[in-house]
Image: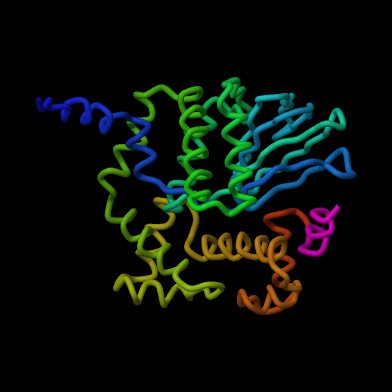
Amino acid sequence: MYKDTSHLLNKVKNDTITKFLNICDFSINGFGKWIPRHQKIINNTMIGDFEIAFFITGKANLTIYNKLYICEENAAFIIPPFTVYTAEWLNKDLKYYYIHFDIKPPYLEDDFKKIILMNNINVLNLNKNYYKDLFENIYQNSRKKTAGYTIEIKSLLNLIIVDMIKNNLKEKKLTTYIDKYLNPSTEMKIVNKAVEIINSKENIFPKISDISYQLNISENYLYKSFMKILKLPPSKYIMYNKIKKSEKMLCCMNYSIQEISDKLGFSSLSHFSKAFKTYFNESPKKYLENKQR
């Protein structure tokens, strides 16, 4: 006998958090298990993408914007891009899993930070039995490159984000964020298309004039659209992406600092170092040295 269950499916579709997660997408930049080897403290550092870490064992102090968090077993912390933090390990058996990721489309980044950090809480206790097993199983699959492991990482990330949103945000408040993305303004559409152009070629970033020409709009209108949606001009958005790319090339690829500067189109090595320091508060050379400790 056939039973119509479409009314139940509609309820799922209308779920507020599901609507939000259907609007955005996450690109996974890194996943693994971290065990400190030597240093006991990382002072005033930052990263170029989002990081979520889930503590397996041990204890650490995490300081973000002068606010102290104590991270223990089953605690998860999230750090947005270019957020200065200090971490101090309080015992030797510290271990945690980590996920590094970016959010797409990029104009969602600012609201995404507000949504998951609504109460200015960077650390959440995920005291659910399945998280530890999930992380370990997916970690083992990622090491073996088991088919589908990247989807598993993304599903795990979505699960954590759902818990973080539930913890920090009321459904009515989330609806106000969603509505503007379900019916995007003209400026939002322009920014989205401009971002696609900016990210369309590996290591090659277009000029502002090229973007406005492809979109058949004036540079002034492009500027106003970026300021309205992203609260920064297109030139700074391009630089922001250059620096994020340079950090990945610095840490994950075998490029010299000079090669990175050349490949990303900086006018000189000193120009690249100065721009990098603006975001990371230290030169590329110093940043790499600290990462390699």
Residue 288 lies within the magenta run? yes
Q: Nearer the viewer, residue 168 or 73?
A: 73
What residue is shown at x 45% (from left), y 72% (from top)? 208
Whether residue 293 sits left or right of residue 219 in the image: it is: right
Q: Main secondary structure of the magenta part?
A: helix
Range covered by the magenta-colored residues: 283-293
Q: Residue furthest right?
A: 38
User: Percent x, y for residue 122?
Assistant: 62, 31
Whether residue 159 sits left or right of residue 82 in the image: it is: left
What residue is shown at x 63% (from left), y 62% (from top)? 243
Residue 289 lies within the magenta run? yes
User: Percent x, y for residue 166?
Assistant: 46, 24
User: Percent x, y for residue 207?
Assistant: 48, 75
User: Percent x, y for residue 269?
Assistant: 74, 75
User: In the image, is residue 173 above or below residue 39?
Assistant: above
User: In the image, is residue 133 above or below residue 248?
Assistant: above
Q: Quadrant of the N terminus?
A: top left
What residue is shown at x 40% (from left), y 51% (from top)? 228
